Image: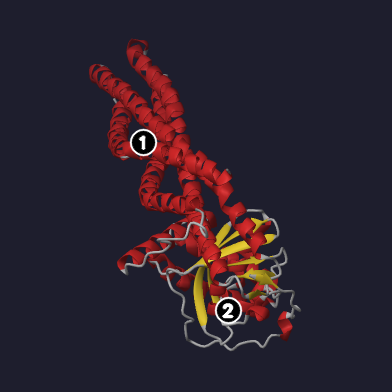
Amino acid sequence: MITEEIPVKKIKDAKKPIPINQESPFKYEELFFSVTDHKSNITFANEVFVRISKYEQEDVIGQLHKLVRHPDMPRAVFNIFWDFLKANKPVAAYVKNMAKDGSYYWVMALAFPCESGYLSVRLKPGSELFEKVKDCYAKTLQFEKKKERDSGDKKLAMHEAQAYLLNLLQEEGFDDYEEFMWNALQSEMTNREETLNKNSVSTHNNLDKNVIPPVLVKVERLLNELVLSLENLKNIHNSLVGHSNYILKLARSIMLLSLNAQIGSSKLDQEDLSLSVVAEKMGEQSVDGEKRLINMKQNIHELSALIGSLNFDIISAKLQVEMTIDFLLELEERKLEKDLSLINSDKVTDLLYDAFIPRLDSIHDGIGKVPAYLRELLNGVKEIERFLLVLRFIHITGKVEVARMNDDAKSFSTTFQDLVQEIETAESHLKELNEVVSDNKNTGTMYTVYKERLQNLIEDINV
């Protein structure tokens, strides 16, 4: 491309389109991206962006990105979006945009801080979650507009609408926006791959190695394999979170039962001291067991956080690499055309590489940790199983002692009955947890292989 300097128009000079209920065509196999400066002025937009927005390139470059903002979008969504970017963190969101003729197009927007501002990649959404989010946005917009009318304060209304939207997302099962974000990304990536496979649409086959470095194609293929593995990681995450919540409850229940037993034993006669010994042992075991259970919960929490981070990094890197290949192909097709961007194509290429290479390093480190976490979890399960066996022995011993003592000791029957119920419930959870970890032993091995393959590709890119 031949870069040309152009006069920058102000957004107020652009004629504001009137929304119409018509969608601007956007295919699943397409990606589009733009680069903005730190004030959100567009400095580069690729051919797909220009075509779908229906603006001329000279109408887009230099404009604020809100040029394509649709009035159906709550301002609260953009506030969340910018909170992440200003914290130097990547962010993803569903966004409804408006083309020059008033038609609309929905995107899953993924934005990253970069050297000259922000790099944003968009894909077409279509998952079941997307349909739910459209409903959440409509409710949030209605809430936001009402708050604006009632208070006359747009900023206050935006912040209250943000809290309202986050509450709606919590009702859908997401603890916070970050958890929603990586689930949404995975849902859209899965939907995209399934749609492309169903329609037999393939991308980036038989590419000219003089245009596209072969290592980029290899990286994209490996990332595609990792994307497909994410469903398995998500299932592990969901299973672990459910058991993690129970584990903390179990630790507290056993500690409370042991305290009740020790308090009760202090009221017994001297001849009933054997039951005091049982209560004391129960207390000792509850302290030891609590440490083991808390360690297991912490391990589950760390693995779940790692899975969330990997999910975001793998999908982000896949889109970034795919976008880089698309951009290099676009450069080749339009190499004799004038480019009206405010940054040249070499700089854009550097920004794309700079976006995905650090993410590959992060993925490499992350997948290398998965096998160790799975081993730790399996060891933790075995430790808790031994702990429960000791509690069963205490329960049996306690029942024998209660049976041969006077009526004052009968109150212990309830305590020991509660204990055995906790043990049985815990054993059920442990069995399920053991199955989750055991069934995914191969996952650890698989990620070890992926780590080695990715290491080789990273070295090839850096040559």
Image quarter of the N terminus: bottom right
Between circles 2 and 1, the one closer to the viewer is 1
Task: Give x and y (percent) for residue 203.
Answer: 41, 64
Q: Considering depth in this image, is 456 or 234 the residue closer to the camera?
A: 456
Give the CA separation, mark 2 to mark 1: 47 Å
Mark 1 sits on what residue?
Answer: 445
Q: Secondary structure at mark 1?
A: helix
Mark 2 sits on what residue?
Answer: 70
Task: Report the amino acid beneath label 1.
Answer: Thr
Q: Considering depth in this image, is 78 or 411 the residue closer to the camera?
A: 78
Task: Report the amino acid beneath label 2.
Answer: His
**Residue 263 visible in rendering:** no
451 lies above or below 324: above
**Residue 7 visible in rendering:** yes
In contact (CB < 8 Å): disc 2 and disc 1? no
Q: Is residue 29 left or right of residue 36?
A: left
273 lies above or below 211: above
196 lies above or below 459: below
Residue at (62% x, 62% y) in the render: 119
